[in-house]
Image (cartoon, grey):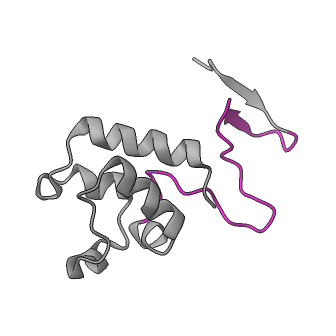
Amino acid sequence: MLQNVLTNDQGTYVRLGVEKAKREKGTAMITIKSKVKDVCESPEALAVIKEVYPAFDATDPRMKQAYGMSLQALLAFPASGCPKEARLAVAEALEDACIE
């Protein structure tokens, strides 16, 4: 059950290769579970998403309605037109990028 996990110096569990602990500044890493608002405010995260899923449009006026949702929930909506494979690719790309 705890494959690919280790304990960091604070005693919390993190997956190997992906640092999930909060940074010293108190900011967390951007992942597919981050709020849409946080993703849209990060040019680096937007670039990663556009590279994997070019149809993502952060300038769409309706995007502000989704600011409180997770990116994962937004991309799961049928209206987004995002296939499951693209959602998985976005999740992996964001984790690999380690964007704060």
Q: Point out the stretch of residues depicted in magenta.
A: 9-35
* Residue at 64% from the left image edge and 60% from the top image edge: 28
Task: Give the overall secondary structure of the magenta segment.
Answer: loop
86 horizontally vs 100: left or right:
left
Where is 12 relative to 6, above or below? below
**Quadrant in the picture for the C terminus:** bottom right
Res 40 quadrant in image: bottom left
Res 3 quadrant in image: top right
**Quadrant in the picture for the N terminus:** top right
Magenta stretch contains residue 76: no
> Residue 11's x, y, as percent?
82, 39
5 horizontally vs 79: left or right:
right
**Foreground of the two, 39 or 2:** 39
Magenta stretch contains residue 20: yes
* Residue at 29% from the left image edge and 71% from the top image edge: 66
68 horizontally vs 79: left or right:
right
> Residue 73's x, y, as percent?
30, 54
> Residue 34's x, y, as percent?
47, 59
23 horizontally vs 44: left or right:
right
Q: Residue furthest left?
A: 79
> Residue 96's x, y, as percent?
57, 42
* Residue at 23% from the left image edge and 58% from the top image edge: 55
